[in-house]
Image (cartoon, rainbow, N blue to C red):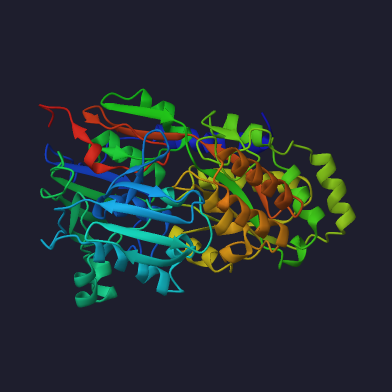
Amino acid sequence: MTAIFRSLLPAALAIALALCPLPAAAQGTKDRLVVAVGSDVATLDPTIYHAIISYNTRINIFDALTDIGPDNNAIPHFATHWESSPDAKTWTFTIRTGAKFHNGDPVTIDDVIFSYQKIMDDERSPTRIHVNHIATIDRLSDTQLRFNLKAPFAPFDRTASIIAIVSKRAYQEMGADAFGKRPVGSGPYKVVNWIKDDRIELQAFDDWWGGAPAIKSVWLRAVPSEASRSAALLSGEVDIVPSIPPALTQTLSNRPGVKVKVGDGYKVVFLGFNPADRSLSDLKMRQAIDMAIDRNAITQKLLRGLAAPSGQIVAKVSFGYDSNRAPTPFDPERARQLIREVGYKGDPILLQYPSDFIASADAVASAIAGYLRSVGINVKLEGMEYNTFYSTWLVRKLPGINLFVFGPNILDADSPIFSIFASSGRRGYLFDPKVDELAEAQRSAADPHKRAQLIADLWREADTYKPFAFLYNEQQAAAMRNEIEWEPQPDGFVRLWKVHRASGQR
């Protein structure tokens, strides 16, 4: 075991041993479920907020035309069915009838169009990246609408799972600020209270088109500390922790009253480079950093085998995964040689990361810093609160290196391609006409085999610039009380309408 990990594993063990029962305030009951999440959201308005931490609220408060099913493909949700033209340039959706918003208003085709159009018209919305391929929307009837795209777009049905349907009347009457605090959706749960940085209280919407949810009350509690979330689970203070760190998985599995479910995950942890940093502007320096990290040691020793080294931004569960792309081999000697060739003088390089979002974030960041220092790179670590990190990352204002994680909730490579690879994405630093050409080409390829090949070509082209160092694919590990019946999906989101408590419990 390397010296890097000798200093980290005792800390992980100390956390595990410190898992003792906490005062059982606001425990889950027969009619209330408490879910511990890493941090609170900035707003409940889905038209202007797209952070991944918002999805556990969004998918339960709002409906979308489609959802991603257990088989990782798009399935009907608010839309009962859809069809596309042979060239995937026009898409026609048929919506459900008789559905209601939480305020009792009927959900109409006009509400669906409004929800899309508002995002399309808002250049500042982070969600706009998922609708900017739409040219116009036609209202065909009270139950049908047609999306006319600027160009063919094969995964449009997957992307339709992202856009939340909001009440047009409520949004316009309330205004964005008020709506963001007490939104009006048509999903299985409605917001009854939001105590900032503490919890969001949800109540089952018995008039939901999918049927009254079994759990009548849900609290989404913000608990930033991984150890605190796990301790709260053991004490019965919370019922579900959707994501637990590898260091605690075995510990929780051995505790009475708790069960852990582990499966394929969709997130890839990576390093992003800001080439505006003088120390990172040379390709050889970025390559050196990539080679200096022992991914096998991190995944097997630090993450206890609950992650696998990765050589790309998407996991195996996502379309666009290239089985021929291997992780970068650990080669510290070659890394040192490249650093000498660059003429690096030891200037400090900042490495920032969201400490409350990535599993075992502090330990992973420390391990990476240790590897980089061992080849002569002067790294300074800075952990940040997720919302602060994310808002800065969105506008490309993070200096130096950033440690982050990407998980396309549509389980399709198009999401990271147009978020951080294509120059139109606004979140990455890569400006390569060939990458942009391949990005557009894969979108328009109706044949999945041809599309997969175009995506593989894009990965290879982008790698010639080394804008990222891909580290590992996280497995999805969730923990819950024994009486909770819930089957996690690779995206890790808690679809509350699928959660049940065993009869006779609590």
Residue closer to the observer: 482 or 11: 482
Q: Horizontal and vertical percent for residue 39?
A: 37, 54
- Counting from the top left corner in percent of width and height, residue 100 is at 14, 56
Q: Nearer the viewer, residue 409 or 347?
A: 409
Disc tally is: 0
Does residue 242 appear to the left or right of 431 in the view shown?
left
Q: Specify the farthest residue to the right.
A: 341
Image coordinates of residue 354 in percent, x first then y, are 50, 55
Using the image, determine if residue 478 lies above or below residue 394.
above
**From what the image shows, is residue 194 above or below residue 502?**
below
Residue drawn at point x = 35 percent, y = 48 percent: 82
Quarter of the figure with residue 115 = bottom left
Left or right of 283: which side holds 152?
left
Residue 53, visible in the rendered structure: yes
Along the horizontal axis of the image, is 408 left or right of 175? right
Which residue appears at 21% of the width and 50% of the height?
96
Determine which quarter of the picture holds residue 118: bottom left
* Residue 382 showing in the rendered view: no
Query: Residue at 74% across / 43% down in the picture?
Result: 292
